[in-house]
Image (tube, coloured by chain):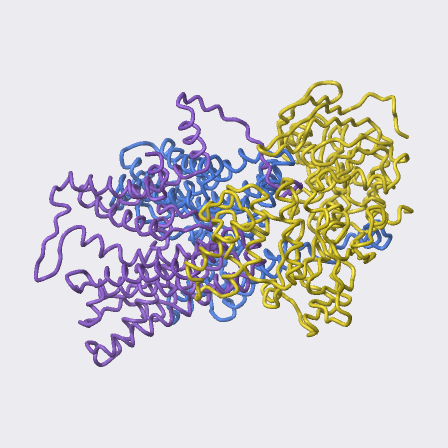
Amino acid sequence: MTTSAPARATRALKIPTRLDRRYLPVLGTFVVLALMLVLGGTRYENFLTPAVVSNLFINNAHLIVLAVGMTFVILTGGIDLSVGSVLALSTVVTAALLQAGLPPAVVIPLAVGAGTVIGLAHGVMVHYFQVQPFVATLAGMFFARGLCFLIAPESIAIENASFVELASWVQIFGGWRMSSSVLIALVVVGLGFLVLHFTRFGRTVYAIGGGEQSALLMGLPVARTKVLAYMVSGTCAGLGGLLFAMYSRSGYSLTGVAMELDAIAAVVIGGTLLTGGTGFVLGSVLGVLVLGLIQTIITFEGTLSSWWTKIVIGVLLLIFVALQRILTLRRT
Amino acid sequence: MTNLLRHHLFWPVAALVVLLVANTIARPSFLAITVRDGHLFGAPVDILRTTAPLLLVALGMTLVIATRGIDLSVGAVVAVSGAVALSHIASSPNPDSPVTVLTAVGLALALCVVLGVWNGFLVSVLGIQPIIATLILMTAGRGVAMLITGGMITTVNSEPFKVLGSGFWLGLPVAAVIAFGVFAVVAFVVRRTALGMLLEATGINPAASRLSGVRSKTLTWTVYTASGLFAGLAGLLISADTMAADANNAGLFIELDAILAVVIGGTALSGGKFNLSGTLVGALVIATLERTVTVLGISPLVTPLFMALVVIAVTLLQSPRMRERLTAAARRPVATTPPEPQPAARPDSTEVKAR
Amino acid sequence: MTQQTAPAVVEMTGISVEFPPVRALDGVDFRLRPGEIHALMGENGAGKSTLIKALTGIHSPTAGTILVDGVERRFTGPADARAHGVSTVYQEVNLCENLTVAENIMLGAEPRLLGGLHWPAMRRQAASHLKRMGLDIDPSSSLGSHSLAVQQLVAICRATVSDCKVLILDEPTSSLDTDEVAHLFTVMRQLRSDGVAILFVSHFLDQVYEVSDRMTVLRNGSLVGEYATADLPPAELVQHMIGRSMEVLEAAEEVVEHAERPAGATPLLQVVGLGRKGSVQPFDLDLYEGEVVGLAGLLGSGRTELARLLTGADRADVGQTRVAGQVTRLRTPRAAMGHGIAYTSEDRKGEGVVDGLTVRENIVLALQARRGWMRPLPRKQVDELVASYIQQLGIRPADPEALLRNLSGGNQQKVLLARWLATAPQLLVLDEPTRGIDVGAKAEIQKLVADLAVEGMSVVFISAELEEVLRISHRIAVMRDRRKVAEIDGGGATMDQVVDLIAGGGTR
């Protein structure tokens, strides 16, 4: 066993000779991100500037929030296809209610809460009725999208003064800009990290992904945790919608079509296994940044057409999935 | 009566009948079919025509799902197929020549088969989870389609190609004839050869199938290839209907509709037993639902809401817990249904199988 | 060491568990005292697991009482049992490999700080628990990075974090090597001296003799008896476990004709030095036409693993296989089928039946798989084939369209036999074909095996019931500790001789 003296000696040095395998995928994402930054920086002028990096965050704040929620669900071994539609629903609810004259202090909780309720419904369907997550959240996706059209088939502009003020709040440090939506997104990331790593709920999320049966036999609250994970994802989608409404100053029922794919891709590229149990919120954030950076590079390139974005994302997905497959094969 | 209720087609057919009745009430002439220029016209004929691409995609999806898989890439394949065919026709000097059209169709289908083979390779050889393996092509596929069309919505004028989408044959829409024809042939092949049984065996118990000498890998690979081919054919029908290849929107969400058709038709996403007749009914339900919404004068944009309600109703009715409740209620007319705490393990095996 | 006088911490009386129509446990009494290591012995299907599950609340007994610390209890499940001091560690460790060692030990009783997990304290506490187990591993490493042996000890560690009165170890040693087993035993003895009652299930007799104080033997769901380990010689224990023939049927009395094998005949299948790391040690075996070779040995002795290597179900690391004199590599079951080799797995549910398909489809599955999907068997031929096997093997219900999941175990087994007979194999390897099925069906299958041999088929027959193996085998290969230890002539072999070989000559 591991009681041998050499093992003790190496540990005493306190220098990890081998990196923990859990961090390898995230490290891979980080390397890819760094390479892309270097590539962009050497190829284009004005690429590695605070403005570009700030914009990367500002343009993707909503996606970061979606990816955080998606990480919770995927860690339990599930999936949430509804986030794009729920985001749209939240923008529409926000815009419609503001148009109706309600104050933001009432509207914002309602818009986010709509996502929470849909998430709750998913959790109940998945856990108590054993509907597969794919189907349950697919139904939720259609439901939310239909609801959007029911509320407002047309785009609604947001003109509420205090909402616009909130949306346009920007803090400038030198060349760096920090908008209110980026601030919110970063707070969500921080909360997500804390919850996943420092609460029993968070650890149970991992445990369920590692083996639901084992988690049950360990006496962990599996049912509650699973339902909560879907609620977290729904809430994040609702919040993402709010951020998107702040970003676009409107509510539109066709927003966020196929955005769930971006969120899932970001999570997978961020090193989270779709089988559950392995992955980090910070990885998902890196995943979103990689996706955003692909877009930025293609814009900078100018001659490259936008569709290359999708192809590059597909290729990156392939590489990451293949790498993860090799890692899991080695382990068994 | 209870036998009828338990028949696997009962709920989907009931849904279809309800939709047809609702339509007929809203518009009494709904079921009427008229003959004009020797062609059949009317809402039912329209429904058959709009079902065609979905039916093809759902056909491939059913076979894939039978092996415990899923194919998310079919929508992207639809887009690629249309892009290839129309680009070829548009670049040809003679778009009305049948040779051009046949070459275009051949090229498109060949590429789609390659895409299917790619999916099958990822799943059966590399052992990547089907949902991720096909997610890759789902994302990249539309990019490829745009690459082919150069980002434009390619439009063409080609009479022979147009026939695929809006032509008539023996009074029936060509698209419907093709789709239902392919469906019938595949259903026949699947049930008359041993394919259906071997697919089901693979889906239900992969380990037992392997020990019985079933070539599960080859079968899995085959169904993904078939799914690619059928999606390609669907792509041709869709692009011939509009005579435009729209890489962004052609076949958008058709993978979800197809999965819904399969689920509504009573095939479980967990694989194994599948039934193609159910998928047929499921596809018809979805197409009729879309039609119903317009007939009832509701904005077609709200269709997703109705879809969601149908899916939730059907999946909940089919969920194990609901089944338990229903059969318990049927056995005991006085429905007190105490939720007995069932032991987690089943007495099937004598040894502890912890996982 | 055994505290005979101490009141029992667990007292189960008259426990019956039924899964209609099967009675898995029939009025079993069981007592566990504090500070003892108590082995629960029995062959497959004897009811060991059922008894443990009845105690921990996974199964609810149809009769009997369970007293824990003198209070009558019916636990609602493992979590409830654990809360009352009864913890179970399974062979397949039920922990989460993706979490850290510290979490696996502490989650549920974790130290908190400001409403969140207090990681440093958690690691510290976990480390001190690990130290008591003599384990020097990093609590913040992930559990999956450790060997199964360490994981097992971590599981025990978790069990001892909360107040643990009873520790159930279900086959903890089956995947451990000698040093790891020794370490585990040290931990077990230490826990015993702390007053914990340990229920130990193992199929390794020498281990049971090394570590246990008392043992309870079950057979076919009934109690055989409770013994002090020191008073029960291994050979006697094996006899208790296997049982004397209660069900020898007159008809099956002389099922084998001991025909002389023609001298110099080529073996149908000949393996030399075939083995697989961690599964079964290299062995030699020759199989001839018209001969039944029995494999005798306890559960876990390597008898199943040997069969799997013969039939391509597992791939061998070393050794050579010759089929009819030709060197061949059997990489897959399909390849083996091509050489006329058929294998029915002992795991009927997991690797045998396709329970969602019908009797007809299950019977033709292998034959059809060999032909490929494009050449379906003509329906008429299928119906005749299926009807003939249903009639010949007496499959009930005699309905080709019945779903297999609705058949009893015995009938499922007959369907599996039919599946392989339909392929007309030259060599049929049957792993526990008679397990868990009733006496009548058992006799029918034995008779069938004998008939097949007379017709010239070569059969390898594996069974936990020694009587059965002795009765129908021409030759018997004896397995112990994943090794083939002897090969004896079936005609002259006696029960005592084989029992001695299985128990390691009774000297260990």
The furthest residue to the top = C71
- In the depicted structure, whether residue A134 falls above or below residue C271: above
Query: Whole-percent x and y of residue C211?
Result: 86, 39
Toward the viewer: B154 or B10? Answer: B10
Toward the viewer: C465 or A161? Answer: C465
Number of marks in the rendered image: 0
Chain coloured blue in the rendered structure: A
Q: Is residue B260 left or right of residue B97?
A: right
Q: In which quarter of the image is residue C320?
A: bottom right
Q: Which residue is drawn at 72% across and 21% down?
A: C67
Q: Quadrant of the N terminus of chain C?
A: top right
The furthest residue to the bottom = B93
**Looking at the image, can residue A187 be seen?**
no
Query: Whole-percent x and y of residue B211?
Result: 59, 58
Q: Colour of chain B?
A: purple
Query: Whole-percent x and y of residue B78?
Result: 33, 63
Q: In this view, does B47 lie to the left or right of B200?
A: left
Toward the viewer: A267 or C471? Answer: C471
Query: Whole-percent x and y of residue B271?
Result: 46, 50
- In the depicted structure, whether residue B291 falls above or below residue B341: below
Toward the viewer: C209 or A103? Answer: C209
**Looking at the image, can residue A122 be seen?**
yes
Chain coloured yellow in the rendered structure: C
